[in-house]
Amino acid sequence: MKTKMLLAGVTAGVMFAGSVLASTLDDVRARGKLNCIINTGLAGFAAPDDKGNWTGFDVDFCRAVAAATLGDADKVNYTTATGKTRFTKLAAGEGELLSRNTTWTFSRDVDLSQTFIGVNYYDGQGFMVPKALGVKSAKGLDGASVCIQTGTTTELNLAEFFAGNNIKYNPVPIETNAEAQELYKAGRCDVYTTDASGLYATMMSFDNPSDHMVLPEIVSKEPLGPVVRHGDDQWADIVAWVLRAMMAGEEKGITSKNVKELAAKDNKDKEINRLLGKDPLQGLSKLGLSPDWAVNVISQVGNYQESFEKHLFPLTIKRGMNALYRDGGLHYIPPIK
Amino acid sequence: MSEKTYKPGNYPDLPPPPGTVGVYGWIRQNLFSSISNSLLTIISVVLLYYLIDGIIGWFFLDAVFDAESKIACRKIDDGACWAVITRRVGQFVYGFYPEAERWRIDITFLTMFLAFAPLLYPDIPKRKWLLYFSAFYPFFAFVLIMGGYFGLQKIEYSLFGGFMLTIILGVCGIVCSLPLGILLALGRQSNLTVVRTLSVCFIEFMRGVPLITLLFVASSMLNYFLPPGTNFSILVRVIIMFTFFSAAYIAEVIRGGIQAIPKGQYEAADALGMNYWQKTRFITLPQALKISIPGIVNTFIGLYKDTTLVVVIGLLDPLGIGRAALADTKWNGLSTETYLFVALFFFVSCFAMSRYSLWLENKLNTDKK
């Protein structure tokens, strides 16, 4: 009898956990802080500075969402998560937003009941070689020994790419990124392959970064983006439009420096007026945001370009695919009207 | 050296021949006793010189103790760049605990020694009064660290990190798992079937599952089972898992101690008409615990070092803080310095525990004196 009751209790608990009790925005406002799940440390994307403040490209996005919803980019509680725990932490409600260089895939989107709200960084698997090797393209890597992390998608991508191009290679299996760095530095492998952003970060950790280069071939698609839970469309829309507002800022030339000025005057470009709350933006009240939401985002965090240049340029990462469509990149946002 | 000659006979008062005693004698006998030996000695000294010179140079002479970043370090000198530690020592010690509130941690840890002193050293003066403080200490420490009462600012657990997190996890785990382990060991030896079965199941389950699995259960699974709104901090969940895990090991160590006690001891206790609790309190446990000290301390040191595993569930212990520091573009690549520093901390604390256990063993060693 007791066991049955206990089971019933547990079941009820599980069912409760699956349902949404109040809107996420209300929860965040009531708490006065946004709970954001970030990486435990990835160069350029999330790392604490000497004073203990988290900074980085992914951290900036948490700050942007806090600025839009709470009016203050500093009102964020950061919860760190590893690759294995990030989805359960989000599902369990330890955070409202997962901003942790997460690749958007079918099964993560559908099977894990999450909503990917867009792409804030297009990554892909690349190859790093010492310049002394004299290789200019991944197709010239015939017979090279390649350091590769076992049990990851990178292993499969590598096999597919080399088989497709009829290139022989010699895999050197390794467990962790740190181990790979040591082996590569010691010359045990000619090539190191992982996500391009990771390659740049690894390269910067060397004493002479300029002795190495990342080859132009990118052999996999890794669209990284922020994630929220299924079931609260209002919250998903807020997060999605915060990302788009940052990109719109770059597109329209709105920066953290001139945003206050542009918000105060009547601009010829009516889209700027609507974004910055000068002209009414139909439906904004449904999101539950105040008219100055985008002003808060851009003035406190900056537009997409500013965030990118601040955190990723020091790693010598170029805009490439992450430029706006008009500059030959992939970021193309819907119009704000 | 003048050679002195003696007539045949006994000369008991003569000093030993020169070159066989003292530093000189030792060197001659051990380092230069033959040509090959002398050669090896010289080669070793030269090698040692280069090694020690290199190590000291890297650690101290060529090291940079304060700089803006790794690049700034390299501009000054090419040894170790300890600036990554000195600039972040606060983070290594307190994690992300707000700077203005760090005095609370300082007080908690200083008073911790006061609370532990009467438990660890029975001969301490005013022990009785200190014991009252020890009993009160857990509440005191909890309120001071977490805040939320008496006008203290409430601190989110996600800000905990660094050595402070290791010490909290380690000390809570150690303090809670010893009594639980003793109970489990007694339970396993009990004549009551239910108690014995439950203890056996618990011990075998906990020992049969890797700690990392338990940590994932703590971080992920429990969230699904508990109704939403029960905000049961991950720190508490992890401490409970650590306690259960090490209690199972402690129980087996103590069971070994209990079984090592000669049967005559129990029979004598029975003959004196003692009941179960008297027998346990006065006969079994004092002897069993004394025998098990090395095993218990061994388990504790293991537990203490296992606290670094929390990094896999995203808590930032010193190792996690170190990795996060390395992810900062300013300090990227200084892994040797960071990991050495963390290793030094663990070595110092584990060595202290092991020394204490030796001291305790000698003190309690009544039968072999």
Image (spheres, rainbow, N blue to C red):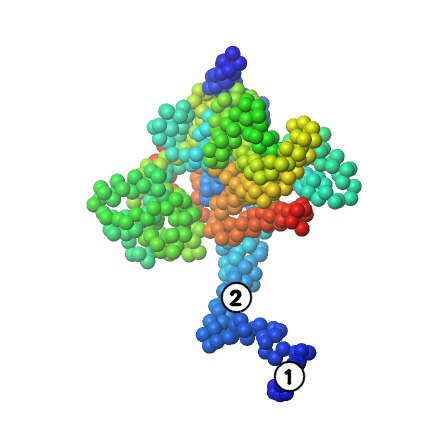
Q: Are marks 1 and 2 on the same chain?
A: yes
Q: How many labels does the image show?
A: 2
Please state the chain letter of the residue tagged with numbered disc 1 in the rendered image. B
Instruction: Residue A272: give x, y in percent of width and height.
Output: 45, 30
Q: Which residue is drawn at 41% across and 54% down?
A: A209
Question: Is residue A185 toward the left or the right of residue A76 in the image?
Answer: left
Residue A219 visible here: no
Disc number for residue B9:
1
**Marked residue nearer the N-terminal end (1 or 2):** 1
**Above/below status of A82 relative to A193:** above
Residue type, numbered disc 1: Gly
The x and y percentages for residue B351 are 59, 49
- Near mark 1 (Cα within 10 A), the count class, few <14, some 14-19 or many ≥20, is few
Q: Is residue A181 left or right of residue B166?
A: left
Q: Looking at numbered disc 2 in the image, what kind of residue is underneath it?
A: Asp
Q: Which residue lies furthest to the top in this view?
A: A1
Q: Nearer the viewer, mark 1 or mark 2?
A: 1
- Please identify the quarter of the rendering in which residue A150 is found: top left
Q: Which chain carries label 2?
A: B
Cα–Cα gap, marks 1 and 2: 54 Å
Secondary element under disc 2, as helix, strand or loop, is helix
Q: Depth check: give the residue in front, B116 or A254.
A: B116
Between residue B11 and residue A92, name the one nearer to us. Answer: B11
Where does the image place residue A188, in percent across and percent down from the top left?
Answer: 35, 54
The residue sitting at 45% across, 27% down in the picture is A228
User: Residue A316, image x and y in percent?
Assistant: 41, 48
Q: Which residue is drawn at 66% across and 46% down?
A: B367
**Is disc 1 in contact with disc 2, using a CB cutoff of under 8 Å?**
no
Whether residue A122 can be seen here? yes
Judging by the rendered image, the residue that carries numbered circle 2 is: B53
Q: Few, some or many C-alpha atoms within 10 Å of disc 2 (few <14, some 14-19, many ≥20)?
A: few
